[in-house]
Image (cartoon, rainbow, N blue to C red):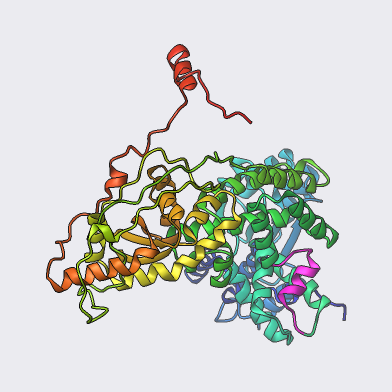
Amino acid sequence: MAYKALYRVYRPQTFDDVAGQEHIVTTLKHAIAENKIAHAYLFCGPRGTGKTTIAKLLAKAVNCTGNNKPCNECSNCKQITQGMHPDVIEIDAASNNGVDEVRDLIDKINYAPTQSKYKIYIIDEVHMMTSGAFNALLKTLEEPPEHVIFIMATTEVHKILPTIISRCQRFDFTKLSNQDIVKRMKVIIEKENFSCDDDALELIAKLADGGMRDALSILEQCVAYNDQHLTLADVNAVYGLISLEKKIDLIKVLLTKDMKQALQLLDQMKTNGIDIKHLTLDLVDILKDIIIYRNTKDESILFVLSKSYLDSIVPYISCEEAFSMIDILMDASEKYAKVINPSIYFELAILKICNQVKKEKVVEVEKVIVPQQDVIQTIQAEENHEEYTDEPIEQITDEDIPTFDFEQKDEIEQQVTDDIIVDTNDIMNILVQAQRSILENIQERWPIIKRYLANLNTAKSAAMLCDGTPVAACPGGLVISFEHQPAVNAVNYYKNYKQLSAFLKEILGDEYRFVAIQSDAFADMRKQFILLKRQNKLPEPHELTLKHIDSHDLDHEDISEAYAYAIDLFGSDITEYKEKK
């Protein structure tokens, strides 16, 4: 016996075997049970979604002589299954689409069925019929003999005349979900004694794009490649795909703006026969998952990424960067159909992504003086403020706190034109409201900051904060300790606050008002806090304030004297400021 493809061997023989299309199956089963059979049906939808299969099931069900329709045991059911029933006629409209063929069909319609109740005409790809053929069929389709049922199937319903559609019961088939496809494939795999990994089946379902027939064809091809145990790597090898890890690595390289390395990776992929169209859509799916997870924190609604993959890519990329990449990749994919080699447009997309480098203004840091007040070092404390020592502690005075006077140049720090005075009452207010659980959560996520150093768009903020240590936190408030004073100055500088605040919100998931402090003062501040607590002189908690920040307009942008003069002279609408290169 000749070999049969899987999709032919395992074509559903009962309505219960059909994968998906529950709305259509339920409607037809009720119509058959109540004997309310229409004279014409139109099945429309994507390829491989069950149109011809359900047409044959309907033909069997209306002619079945058994109790369960279709029973697959009576002679009518068996002959229809084998394609040998004289009263079930399948017509390919692609090759029988003329007026003469329709007239011949009309002549034969009047003959009664030979051995069943209904004579059924299944017309596949009916949209291929000419306008003349459709018009010739109109009258017969509207009032056929009582023993005739038309079942027409098409993938392009928009090409069918409205007068034909109005004479039929129309059923719209939808693409099958990946879950339905995988479920059906597992049934077939068990019957065929195949061995497959679940992730391999999930990839096959994705490649099938909602078509059960396509899924079984892909499965058959992959099993032929490895009939011992089908793995995800086998499917990737057969269809020229790359692993999810390599796709994530490519995105990371694009984030670093390393054009040379990105092109080298692409060259390796092309050498391995990568499908550029699939790669583009896969990258878009990954970026979509990143955006969804950043906004929802819900892994269950993601399409591609699991927890392990999320940890390897999400810390490196913001939603804005993901959206920007998606726009560039989708613009490239729209042009693939216009060229023979789509890799040209994909290479251009990579160049465009790598070329999106934001230029940061680098200036010097000038003299900064630490406030001449009692400085409170941060303490990890519950609301009851647990004590750290029982030794007597003397009152700390202003003379105990050193003054720093220095000049420091650093690429990550902005120019400071005024002395920064941090009000220790603001820090104390955070300490008296400190909660250990909040601090531990922040400390757990803090190491993620170093991952953002690889991204040029976030490297500046990450570099300012990565050497810091969260030492106290309350709802909405955070104190960060640094070893060196220049880092404290950079974080406390009001012109850096807005950028750092947005960055911390992205890392920690919540917005915090933050203040930096030098770690050298830790012991003195710790003693001062404990002493105030023992004396019952801790201040009452109140709304969080940061006087060194709140006293400035964070939205104000400094402009040069020349630029201000230009605005006065020509107006702001036509004046544009550009830095000298």
Residue 232 inside the magenta-drawn segment: yes
Number of on-image labels: 0
Give the quadrant of residue 76: bottom right
Name the spot of residue 451 as percent of width and height, x first: 56, 62
Give the quadrant of residue 477: bottom left
**For residue 109, side relative to residue 476 (left or right):** right
**Residue situated in front as seen by the camera: 244 or 405:** 405
**Residue situated in front as seen by the camera: 98 or 146:** 98
Give the residue at x 72% y 84%.
195
**Residue situated in front as seen by the camera: 550 or 104:** 550
Q: Is residue 557 above or below residue 520?
A: above
What quarter of the picture does the N terminus occupy? bottom right
Q: State which region is magenta.
A: 229-243
Residue 97 inside the magenta-drawn segment: no
Q: Is residue 534 visible?
A: yes
**For residue 217, side relative to residue 417 (left or right):** right
Residue placed furthest toward the right:
2
Give the residue at x 17% y 68%.
532
Q: Is residue 120 visible?
A: no
What quarter of the picture does the C terminus occupy? top right
**Residue situated in front as seen by the camera: 13 or 255:** 255
Q: Is residue 362 above or below residue 558?
A: below
Residue placed furthest toward the bottom:
193
Give the residue at x 65% y 75%.
199
Q: Is residue 480 above or below residue 527?
A: above
**For residue 501, side relative to residue 85 (left or right):** left
